[in-house]
Image: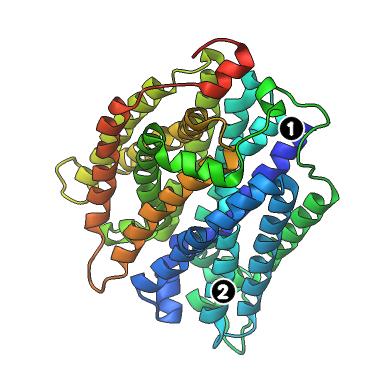
Amino acid sequence: RRWYILALYSVLAGTQGSLWNTWGPISDSAKFVFGWRNSDIALLTNWGPIAYMVLAVPFSWLMDVKGLRLTVILAGFCVFAGAGIRCLTAFSLQAGTWLMNIGQLLNGAAGPVAMAAPPALSAAWFPHEQRTTATAIGITVGAILGAGSFLIGPLIICIRSSKCVLFMYHGYCGGVGGRLHLYMYMRTNQFAWTALIFLLILAYFPDKPPSPPTISASKDRLAFGSGVKQLLRNGRFWLVCVSYGILNGTLSSYGGLLDVNLSPHNITQVEAGWVGFYGSIAGGVSGIFVGRFSDMLGGHFKLTILVMTVGYIGSLLWLILMLYHNIVPFNTASMYASFLLLQVCALGSEPLFFELGVESTYPTAEGVTTCVLTWVNNFFGLLLLLVMMIPRIGTDWMGWATLGSGAAVIPLMLLFRERYGRLAVDTGKRK
């Protein structure tokens, strides 16, 4: 049952991420058809972090006080409603921009659960020797499932007219615009998919199993208010939190606008879609592998994070020098290799940040800790996207900002002292 619960949650998180990433991969076509600017694409992407900033605390309270079932049901409904509103854009071009923004906002409202729930779910359902693996699956399977969002739009829109089914839209047929509306019309399939997920969650998604899988799972956590106060005073936690936020927050925004960043360098949105697709797959597999390896070690997350951060810095520097300054000769193989290595290091370390944060704050509830972690993540991602909305600012600066954020993680994590409070309770050994 625990693997079914984890799989159902992971599918929900992957679907939410896929819907969030609708517009970045097809930004060139969307700007051509709707007359949008880079700032409009950034706003559609920005609704995820904006909704997160507002709703992280309510969802954190809900997860802690009311349990996983109600929290995941509400998240599933938000994704379902957001997908439904987006379908209306196939019938009303005038209202399309408004409806797309509303749909993105509703989908973004599910972000606190899609991003922050894995450690709470793994703590409630899994034994300690599988906990980091389960957290990794909950986080990274979403990235693997969401990888298709980098491809579906560009492939539909950029396919040759002679090889595609033309879609009539108020007398407008064929061309980029017609295929863009075909793509939006296909959102009805996503709506049906989100409806199925929502019904499955309603049918069976309990808070926890009949008997706790670990000693720590049987013990009460601090009350919500007390947990938040302890969290705010925990300096060790903030070292982890800021490190995770600046590393993954800036990269997620950079990756969400991958086509915008690559198009000035004569890289088509289809090619950018393949880069994002393979990067998400590689990163997701890396996260699961690193999570399992860390479970076998029973700790030592700090060293693994430092090693992967060095790899992150090196691969991003390689990409920047190749794309923006021609210091490293450009070729397609190098572009793929650098971005894949970047995603492997970033997504591979993400579950470790979550588990290290939870271990550092025990007995604060897992949902409270991870909601704060991901709130900071979205804060840094939002900052990057807000700067992107400044007229004529360009895109080259985003790579250097993302690189600087990664470099800042090294001194922060060197200052961090490891403590595994929850694991010590479960194993009877001081970690």
Tag 1's secondary structure? Answer: helix
Q: CA distance from mark 2 to mark 1?
A: 33 Å
Where's residue 174, x and y in %? 55, 78
Q: Which residue is drawn at the image coordinates 56% and 14% (left, top)?
A: 296
Viewer can see residue 341: no
Q: Which mark is residue 3?
A: 1
Q: Quadrant of residue 33?
A: bottom left
Q: Quadrant of the N terminus?
A: top right
Q: Quadrant of residue 128?
A: top right
Q: Which residue is drawn at the image coordinates 65% and 47% (left, top)?
A: 63
* Vertical comparison of 313 with 133: above or below: below
Q: Which residue is drawn at the image coordinates 52% and 19% (left, top)?
A: 293
Q: Which mark is residue 102?
A: 2
Question: Is residue 13 or residue 211 the one in the foreground?
Answer: 211
Q: Earlier in the sequence, mark 2 or mark 1?
A: 1
* Vertical comparison of 207 with 270: above or below: above
Where's residue 170, x and y in %? 62, 89
